[in-house]
């Protein structure tokens, strides 16, 4: 068969919201029935799943050509993976036998789509893929993962598309730039909603400094008391040296609250328009979504301080700052010790990070204001880099990576 290369990659969609090859599918959701998804809660019900393939319509139309018939050229069969319950219902996956045949002969690959997350390959993707392989009798080279993770794995091709980098916040920039030379109320901002062992550890390490900044810890972050207790157990296993201090100081004060009109046990402020806390704090301390060395993910948390013209440090995956630099961003090593970023041991990385934070916030407000003014070229650079990448770079990179995975790795 002769393959004809289009500039876009072809995406086989069973129901595109206009026509439906398979009527019991949600628009832009392949393989899984409406009934199975409704029972499992495995798909975000509040949004059009089309946006899992690209935040902006321009990215989607730039990258993909939607098809509903088997073409002569190569194509992707996408499966949207929004929430982890997909793993529990994946055995109910049903695919057109002609598509399955195209997958087996190398004309088609299954595209596993989850740009909101950067899950561990070992803990999440590998078990999910194994279940699909068992159902459809496929091999690893039948799959491509399109998610927000940056770490490759040795089994399945990973194509990075990070929804959060493309989620621009232009409206916040003028106010942020206008506040750089003003004395601020708070030396740091560290907000923690969803319970996680590393967030409990970070709050414990900063607890004695909480009067100098904004330090929050939600009661359960909307995940319920049992989830919180499970995270607390992991915290005790992974950060044993902090158990006593956490129990004596932090637990009696939970929830630690900053009154900005957002209830962290109800809302997830991915888009946060309550700006005062950003413009009235000198340093943003980010506790990223993940912190171990089995993945590398940049959520909206890492991009918020760029839009608000704040320096930042991050307790996340080792190499987080290194990855930002690969994407063209600048960090603050001239002003803040960033040696913690290369340390793979979680406890040691936290100790190094805490030392960096305390050295920085030991300075007077006047000194910190002067440092922020010296940082302005970095703020400007990062804002320009986000614009540049949003304009064409993200689109081209995604398109080229998807085409490479489909054609050159068949």
Image (cartoon, grey):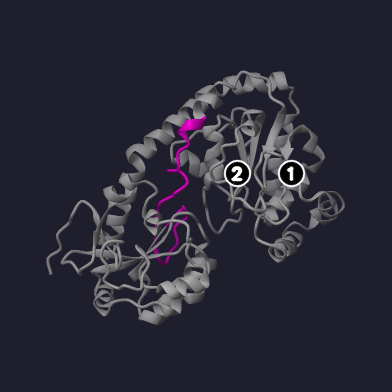
Where is 122 relative to 52, above or below? below
Residue tagged 1: 257
Q: Residue 73: horizontal and vertical position, in percent?
A: 18, 64
Q: Residue at x 50, y 33 (%)?
A: 330
Q: Position of residue 131 (x, y in %)?
A: 45, 77
Mark pair 2, 1: CA separation: 28 Å
Q: Which residues are magenta?
A: 147-172
> Which residue is more in the foreground, 324 or 254?
254
Q: Main secondary structure of the magenta part?
A: loop
Quadrant in the picture for residue 302: top right
The answer to whether any part of residue 307 appears in the image is yes
Q: Which residue is mark 2?
A: 341
| Residue 178's disc number | none
Residue 180 relative to residue 389: left or right: right
Judge the density around disc 1: few (<14), some (14-19), many (≥20) Cα neighbours within 10 Å.
some
Of callouts 2 and 1, the N-terminal one: 1
Vertical placement of 130 versus 241: above or below?
Answer: below
User: Which x, y percent locates residue 91?
Assistant: 44, 79
**Element assignment for label 1:** loop
| Residue ID at (28%, 49%) | 61
Position of 294 relative to 284 (above/below): below
């Amino acid at each position: 068969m002769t393959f004809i290369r289009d500039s876009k990659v072809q995406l086989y969609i069973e129901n595109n919201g206009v026509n439906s090859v398979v009527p019991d599918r949600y628009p832009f959701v392949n393989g899984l029935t409406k009934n199975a998804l409704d029972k499992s809660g495995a798909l975000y019900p509040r949004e059009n799943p089309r946006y899992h393939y690209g935040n902006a319509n321009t990215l989607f139309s730039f990258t993909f050509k939607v098809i509903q018939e088997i073409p002569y050229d190569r194509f992707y069969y996408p499966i949207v993976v929004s929430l982890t319950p997909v793993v529990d219902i994946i055995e109910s996956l049903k695919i057109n036998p002609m598509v399955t045949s195209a997958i087996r002969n190398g004309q088609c690959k299954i595209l596993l789509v989850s740009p909101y997350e950067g899950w561990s390959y070992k803990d999440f993707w590998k078990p999910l893929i194994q279940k699909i392989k068992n159902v459809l009798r496929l091999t690893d080279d039948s799959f491509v993962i399109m998610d927000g993770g940056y770490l490759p794995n040795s089994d399945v091709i990973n194509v990075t598309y990070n929804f959060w980098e493309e989620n621009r916040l232009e409206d916040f920039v003028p106010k942020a730039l206008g506040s750089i030379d003003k004395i601020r109320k708070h030396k740091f901002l560290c907000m923690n909603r969803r319970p996680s062992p590393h967030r409990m550890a970070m709050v414990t390490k900063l607890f004695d400094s909480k009067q100098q900044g904004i330090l929050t810890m939600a009661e359960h972050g909307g995940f319920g008391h049992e989830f919180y207790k499970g995270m607390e157990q992991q915290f005790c296993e992974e950060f044993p040296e902090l158990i006593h201090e956490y129990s004596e100081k932090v637990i009696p004060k939970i929830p630690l609250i900053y009154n900005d009109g957002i209830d962290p046990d109800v809302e997830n402020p991915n888009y946060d328009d309550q700006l005062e806390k950003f413009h009235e704090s000198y340093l943003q301390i980010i506790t990223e979504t993940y912190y171990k060395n089995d993945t590398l993910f940049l959520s909206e948390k890492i991009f918020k301080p760029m839009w608000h013209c704040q320096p930042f440090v991050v307790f996340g995956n080792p190499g987080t700052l290194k990855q930002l630099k690969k994407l063209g961003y600048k960090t603050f090593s001239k002003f803040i010790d960033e040696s913690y970023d290369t340390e793979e041991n979680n406890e040691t990385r936290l100790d190094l990070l805490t030392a960096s934070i305390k050295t920085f916030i030991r300075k007077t407000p006047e000194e910190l204001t002067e440092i922020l003014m010296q940082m302005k070229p970095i703020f400007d650079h990062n804002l320009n880099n986000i614009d540049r990448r949003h304009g064409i770079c993200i689109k081209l990179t995604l398109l080229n990576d998807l085409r490479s995975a489909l054609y050159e790795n068949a």
